[in-house]
Image: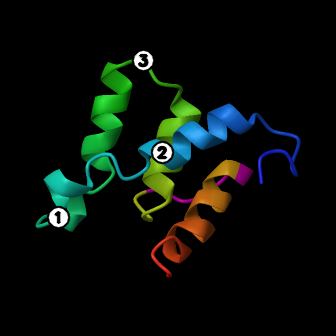
Amino acid sequence: MAEHFGEDPEFWGMAGLLHDLDYEKTLHTPERHTWLAAEWLKDKGFDEKLIHAVKAHAEAVTPESKLDWALYCSDPTTGLW
């Protein structure tokens, strides 16, 4: 999708890989999902646009960018087999 929109596939790919980084730690506290990952990513110096997309995929913040919306829309389909 990144290529389709003329965006950086590596940056979008990193968002895809990291968006559920805290899933195991927040499994029983879903209201913390993405917030914990955002803290970790910020501490490691990740770009704020990537952090926003991670939070937006689980409706912690409102999706704004094409990356936010792409992650938000594609996340529910990843478990289909």
State how many labels appear.
3
Identify residue type, mark 1.
Leu
What residue is pinned by disc 1? 27
Secondary structure found at label 1: loop
> Could you tell me what secondary structure mostly forms the magenta stretch?
loop
For badge 2, the amino acid type reads: Leu
Residue name at image x 43 percent, y 51 percent: 55
Q: Position of residue 76 (x, y in %)?
A: 50, 75
Give residue 32's quadrant in the image: bottom left
In the picture shown, does residue 31 fall above or below 53? below
* Mark nearer the viewer, 3 or 1: 1
Disc marking residue 45: 3
Classify residue 53 as left or right of residue 37.
right
Badge 3 local density, few (<14 within 10 Å), some, or many (20+)?
few
Would you say residue 65 is visible in this rendering? no
Q: Nearer the viewer, mark 2 or mark 1?
A: 2
Where are the magenta residues, as a range?
61-66
Q: Which residue is mark 2?
A: 17
Q: Position of residue 74 (x, y in %)?
A: 60, 67
Give the residue drawn at x 15%, y 52%.
25
Q: Are marks 2 and 3 in contact (CB under 8 Å)?
A: no
